[in-house]
Image: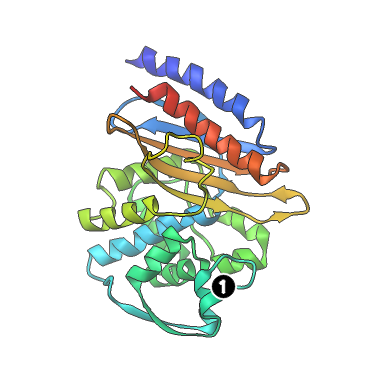
Amino acid sequence: MLSSVLLLQSVLSPLFAELARTSGGHVGVFATVLGSADRAELNGSERFPMQSVYKVPIVMAVLDQVDTKTLTLNQKISLTAKDMVPAGAHSPLRDKYPRGGIDITIRQLIRAAIADSDGTASDVLLRTAGGGPRVTAYLRGLGIRDMAVATSEADMTRDFTVQYKNYSTPQAAVELLKALSDGRALSTASRQLLLDDLIASTPGPRRLKGLLPPGTVVAHKTGTDATREGVTRATNDIGLITMPDGRQLAIAVFIKDSTADEAAREGTIAKIARAAWDRWQR
């Protein structure tokens, strides 16, 4: 068993490194087939800015409080103009209700944050969860040490350097996906709710999903920084990919500080996901 794992690592890790050359930046990858010893990585223990990937732990921390009856999914929160993230951050909610004046349920906020990657929804949920320290404490309670949530979408929009405070290693991101998949992190109902929203997530169709067979089920969350002076500091995607035999491939691909265009960055992620798929499918 050990020799076969080492063989896969010796094959996939150099392939990941080769594919990473097209990214124009620094690439981190961690991939594993859940329930097996199969794994491969590239810079898997290095820290990368998460950008919107961090919405997954934020939502999980909120759902944990739903599970413990501190919050309810039907609980309504009133949004004002002050709740809206600044221009430059992605937020369909802000675009539709720039002055606020709406009441929205926690369930609706979760759907918006995950499926639409809405920055306003994410920031309201972060506040509702108790802030960055509370979310990070939730992660530590799951045994995840190399992921931290420190600040908001609004703060990242006002100062792009702040995004490095919301970090994860690729391995930690996969540990989070594993905790979600195996039921350790949330109740069955909360787990399924989040997985459904991750499957419905619309951003990044050319990333993890880009080169996989049509119809492949991918529960994923992207993260993307704006390009400033030719540099994009985060282009990410993490997810659970259902393979033909029903096993799940958990994978995290992070690209930081890239000078390549979007097509090249997304293509790198798609090729890495396909390489893992090809090696591990039966």
Badge 1 marks a residue whose secondary structure is loop
Left/right placement of residue 138 relative to residue 234 reads: left
Residue displayed at 52% across by 56% down: 52
Residue displayed at 36% across by 42% down: 217
Q: Is residue 141 depicted above or below 29 in this figure?
A: below
Q: Nearer the viewer, residue 177 or 88?
A: 88
Toward which corner of the image does residue 7 lie, by quadrant?
A: top left
| Residue 40, visible in the rendered structure | no
Q: Nearer the viewer, residue 117 or 47?
A: 117
Q: Position of residue 56 (x, y in %)?
A: 42, 55
Residue located beneath label 1 in the image: 85
Amino acid type for the residue under numbered disc 1: Val
Query: Which image quarter is the C terminus in?
Result: top left
Label 1 Cα neighbours within 10 Å, binned few <14 / some 14-19 / many ≥20: many
| Residue 73, visible in the rendered structure | yes
- Tell me how the rendering is colored: rainbow
Residue displayed at 63% across by 41% down: 265
Q: Total number of numbered labels?
A: 1
Query: Which image quarter is the N terminus in?
Result: top left
Q: Is residue 257 depicted above or below 80 in this figure?
A: above
Q: Nearer the viewer, residue 127 or 249?
A: 249
Residue displayed at 56% across by 22% down: 15
Q: Is residue 124 depicted above or below 16 in this figure?
A: below
